[in-house]
Image (cartoon, rainbow, N blue to C red):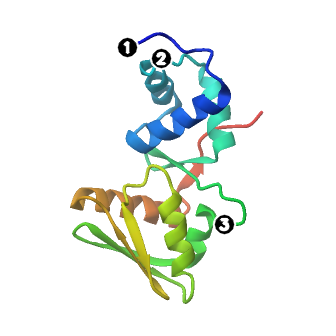
Amino acid sequence: MGATLSHVDKGTRQDLILRLISEQVLGTQQDLVAALAENGVEVAQATVSRDLAELGVLKVGHRYLALPHDPGAAGIEVLPSFVLGVTTAQNTIVIRTRDGTAGAVANVLDRIKGLKIVGTVAGQDTVFAVSSYNAAAEEAASLIADVCRARTKPAGNLE
């Protein structure tokens, strides 16, 4: 690729990490180190680990998802409490929620980087989330269900 940008500032590196995990299925920190290197940024795995922790990235199944970080807004941690069920209908994901929580769930889903959803519509207790194609909807529904079953873990460690 181009010149090595190993001396990029932390903010630029973390923005690149968020872009990479939203565009690619990266299953390990080493995969992310390699993807950064392909983009000209040479970093150690320990640096990536700290970046992932600071960004609030979760490992869900075999890929990373970036948590939404808007002050005062609900985060991904509300999904297990609010979501009652997830099903797909072609490229649409139907998410049943507790009464009155669909708007919060839709807001969280709209802000998660790496989730293949192009948009959501919320009612009182149902969210319709649309993906570009059927397989993307199945993948997104599976990831949402994994989060709701708490099959997630932090992707990095703060020291």
Q: Could you classify mark 2 by the number of other residues whose Cα lies within 10 Å: few (under 14), some (14-19), or many (20 or more)?
A: some
Among the 4 quarters of the image, the one containing residue 137: bottom left
At horizontal 56% and vertical 69% (from top left) the residue drawn is: 79
User: What residue is disc 1 on?
Assistant: 1
Q: Amino acid at mark 1?
A: Met
According to the picture, the residue beneath numbered tag 2 turns out to be 40
Q: CA distance from mark 1 to mark 2?
A: 7 Å
Marks 2/3: CA distance?
A: 34 Å
Q: Secondary structure at mark 2?
A: loop
Q: Is residue 95 above or below residue 111?
A: below
How many numbered markers are drawn? 3
Q: Is residue 44 left or right of residue 39?
A: right
Q: Please give the label number shown on residue 149.
A: none
Q: Earlier in the sequence, mark 3 or mark 1?
A: 1
Question: In what quadrant of the picture does the N terminus appear?
Answer: top left
In the rendered view, would you say 52 is above or below 131? Answer: above
Among the 4 quarters of the image, the one containing residue 48: top right
**Left or right, residue 4 beside residue 93:** right
Seen at 22% across and 61% down, the residue is 134
The three-letter code of the residue at mark 3 reads Ala
Residue that badge 3 annotates: 73
Which amino acid, mark 2?
A: Gly
